[in-house]
Amino acid sequence: MNNGDFNEFVEHLTDNARSSLRHADAIARSLGSAYVGTEHLLLGVLHQDTSVGAKLLAEVGVTFDRAKLVLNLTPRALVISSGAKGLSETAKLTLRLSWDVAQEFNQDYCGTEHILYSILTQKNARATTLLQDMGVNVDSLISELEGYLNRQHFDFGGEEKLASHAAAKKNRQKQGALNYFGSDLTVRAADGELDPVIGRDQQIERIITILSRRTKNNPVLIGEPGVGKTAIVEGLAQRIAAEDVPEHLLEKRLIMLDLAAMIAGTKYRGEFEERLKKVIEEIVQNQNIIVFIDELHLLVGAGAAEGAIDAANMLKPALARGKLHLIGATTLEEYRKHIEKDAALERRFQTVMVPEPSQDDTVAILKGLRPHYEQFHGVTMDDEVVENAAFMARRYIADRYMPDKAIDVLDETASQVRVRLSRRPSKSRQLTRELKLLSERMEDAVAAENYERAAMYKTRISQIQQKLSELKQEKSSRSGHVITSEDVARAVSVMTGIPVSRVKRSEAAFLANLEKHLSKHIIGQDEAVAAVARAIRRNRSGINAGERPIGSFVFMGPTGVGKTELARVLARQVFGSDKSLVKIDMSEFRERHTAARLIGAPAGYVGYDDGGQLTDKIRRQPYSVVLFDEIEKAHPDIFNMLLQLLEDGRLTDAKGRSVDFSNTIVILTSNLGAERMRKEAALGFKAASRDQKQALEAMHGENETAARDALAEMMRPELINRFDAIIVFRALAKRHIGRIFDIYAAKL
């Protein structure tokens, strides 16, 4: 085989890989072939029956002898003839790709498994066709080979070793395990592969301070999923790469360790411990390494088996001595569940809380990321689009956190626009098909030694490539599509299922006509509707101080006058869906111990892991109407919770999580004074004359006073003063019943 064909591969090849190539050349010459093709490379791999590639093929029933039969080979035809053969273009590409595959899987050698993987991924190669003729499922074989390569490690997996390459061996002995199981964030930051980190200076400075301590110098970032814990660590890596850190941190390498990869493929006891021990030894020997472990709670119990210790216990000694710098990231729930229980492990970490960014901070983050998404999707976005993405993400996407959900909205919007506008032109598709066909014909012509025809094909291929290049330049020269707020609304609608019209509407215009929207569904309660609309507009205008709920009301009145219906209509009109109504039946909270169910049972009690009936629902859906139905039946301890909720706009659940109620409307309903109101209801249904109507008004005034007095006896003044309005509903007249009937009849 010509040495020039393999100069760029030979120093990385294993012994088996070298032998397989020699046999590929011999097989090609025995067949009288003018070149060494992929089918010969495949037979060369099979000839090395002890190699990884041959063993993987044997598992699917492919052997050297069977492949010979398919190619009509006989033992007599394998007589080696003189003269060396060149590689076909496909075979050259195969060998180049095999080294790329090896590097992709962090290997410093190229073995038969990498050559086989490279062959299989070329769907039109003759070797792939040969395997398909033998009944092999190529896609399944690729998946199996990928699994093997993912598990493989130079010390633990892989039967083939680098035959000759002293520099690679030396490099392998230095930090090999850490390089295999980790990703160097400082190198990625220096290469510009990481997204910019906006804000979070306080958390990054805190991490730097903890890392600078003599002992217990291991920070752990604690925050909800999506608030940017990993981004903060990437921000630290960017600072190290930019030399914007104290002098003693300038030479540090920040490496993100993949714990799942370390566990994967460890079938027998001791394998995981051996891997982790090597990683720890490398870190301790090189004091310039800082390790980052995302999902830190996975350390507890990782790799533990009968008679073995888990990763957390293996790390404790090095952490305690300050020999190992470790940054962790996890959620508050997982930290308390796994790490807090192990006091010896917890005391080795210093916590850094990562709160969810505010709306303004999220907008700043999106503006910093905007150029990356514009370049990737080929679009442009103005500030209004970015601000709308942040607003709609907070408003309509529940149970997720900023800035993650806002970034998702921006990415989804740009992706939808890109898909809609970037359909490949038919001319480009036609030229690509023609290019593929001509390439195959040129390869066949070379194989048949018809070089004149091959040269003709090559000329035509060059012309097509030039045309494709011109089309690509023409497309890239066009200015990117400008994304609008309507595109953002459309993307949010797809993500949430909320109609586009409701997402797009102007809040100011909607609130100005809120009475009109509510009155279409609530009949005979104009005063109640007006009071609710005024309070909500007042909150949205910014007049209300602090982080109180959007509105807080007490609805009083007899059964059937529309108290619960108004709450349901508010949820539908203000928040877009009846599902935004969180109804709590207070008859279930009569006893003292039941009050805890709203925020969750204390630690050690039954139901601790279930969460709070109220707090969990608001965490998942922060934009809601919260209805406490028949509040007079609740235990007085409930009122203490309401006092905090109405004043501060938040509650702290049993697990210590602060739940934000600032985007809710809180409504309490009560039947206090219902006995007196029944007389009003009876009179209201019959009232026709002016005198009767005047008597009805007087009776309503008396009933309202009595209802407020009854409420004052039940609640403390400081709680009553927290409500935006206490509304006593009127009794319905006969004409109101008719209109209500018409509304429901129209739905049939």
Image: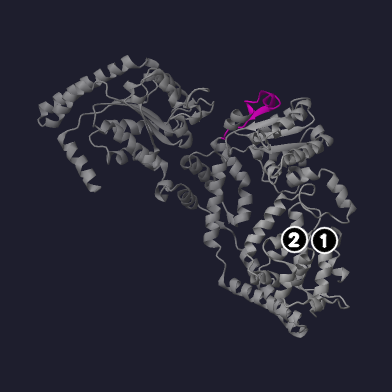
Is residue 209 positioned above or below 293 on the image? above
Closer to the camera in the image, 284 or 707: 284
Q: Amino acid at mark 2?
A: Gly
Residue 100 percent across, percent down from the top left: 76, 59
User: On the image, numbered disc 1 is attached to which residue?
Assistant: 16
Looking at the image, residue 593 sits to the left or right of residue 412; the answer is: left
Tag 1 secondary structure: helix
Q: Residue at position x 77%, y 35% from top?
A: 245
Residue 68 percent across, percent down from the top left: 74, 73
Query: What number is the disc on residue 636?
Result: none
Q: Amino acid at mark 1?
A: Asn
Q: Are marks 1 and 2 in contact (CB under 8 Å)?
A: yes
Residue 257 percent across, percent down from the top left: 72, 41
Q: Tell me the crowding category of disc 2: few under 14, some 14 to 19, or many 20 or more residues within 10 angstroms, Cα based.
A: many
Closer to the camera in the image, 271 or 639: 271
Is residue 368 positioned above or below 74 on the image? above
Is residue 337 visible to us here?
yes
Color encoding of the figure = one colour
Q: Quadrant of the N terminus?
A: bottom right
Q: Residue at position x 31%, y 14% from top?
A: 713
Q: Classify residue 596 by image quadrant.
A: top left
Residue 479 percent across, percent down from the top left: 60, 60
Q: Is residue 163 magenta?
A: no
Tag 2 secondary structure: helix
Is residue 463 visible to us here?
no
Query: What number is the disc on residue 53?
Result: 2
* Start-end of magenta stretch: 339-357
